[in-house]
Amino acid sequence: MQSLKQQVKNFRPRLSDWKIILEGIFVIIAFSRLFYGSYYMIFVLCPIIIPWFFHQKKRMKKRESKEIGMQFKDAMMAVSTAQKAGYSIENSFLSAIHDMKLLYGKNSLICNELMIVARGLKNNRTLEQLLEEMGERSANKDIREFAAVFAVAKRNGGNMTQIIERTVKVIRQRAEVEKEIEVLISAKRMEADIMDIVPFAIMLYIGLTSPGFFEPLYNNIPGILVMTLCMGLYIAAYLLSERIVDIDI
């Protein structure tokens, strides 16, 4: 895994990245106003945006990994169907692109990955290597495991149709378990999201209904230290709540 310094150095912003940055700026403004009563603290708290950004990117990458895992299952079903119709394994992957465009749209994650595979095959690269690279890009363990099994089977002359069918079965079973867990913890996740907002809502309510209530904590060193401690506890609670409801299969 890349260090924070390497991630900053390799950063190439996309549209979704700017959205995360704007969200981070909003959070910094809220922290500055509610915890310190001063917008000047925005300049002091600005460095927080960097870990915030990469934390949110990690969450987004994880969501995309789960999404492409589900799409990969359907792609393998299309590949299996093409194989049964007599296509070679390479042509089966190429034919699956059309099915995935109809199912998920041409800009979907799986279509983008299959297009990369198609370009690689046209450049005489091996399918094993292309699948391995897909697994690395997607960070999805189902794809990585399939690529590893596929490479061994291709070298040793295994039955590709059976391997793909078994892969689809395993991915489907894992997806069903994940779905059950999502249903079980969805209420807790909503509670965690609400609790993330509650401290800000309480402070905002008190600030509006009782002006000057927090003044003793602003513009003096003891008050700043207390509010900094409170902000640190809030951030720790936020990260802990995310960790509790984030369950991997």
Image (tube, grey):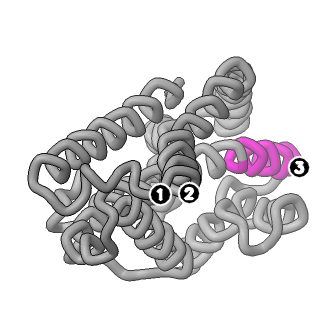
Q: Label 2 vs label 3: CA separation?
A: 69 Å
Query: Label 3, label 1: how many angstroms apart (C-alpha)?
Result: 74 Å
Q: Which residues are magenta?
A: 71-85
Is residue 146 shown to the viewer in this render? no
Tag 3 and tag 1, C-beta contact below 8 Å: no
Disc number at residue 208? 2
Q: Nearer the viewer, residue 30 or 159?
A: 30
Left or right: residue 21 versus residue 227 is right
Q: Nearer the viewer, residue 216 or 229?
A: 216
* Mark 3 neighbour class, 10 Å CA radius: few under 14, some 14 to 19, many 20 or more: few
Magenta span contains residue 80:
yes
Q: Residues within 10 Å of mark 2 (few under 14, many from 20)?
A: few
Q: Given the image, on which type of amino acid does mark 1 rest? A: Pro
Q: Nearer the viewer, mark 3 or mark 1?
A: 1
Mark 1, other Cα within 10 Å: few <14 / some 14–19 / many ≥20:
few
Nearer the viewer's eye, disc 2 or disc 3?
A: 2
Task: Provide the residue designation for mark 1.
Answer: 211
Q: Please tell me which residue is depicted at 24% across the width and 66% down the height of the picture.
A: 45
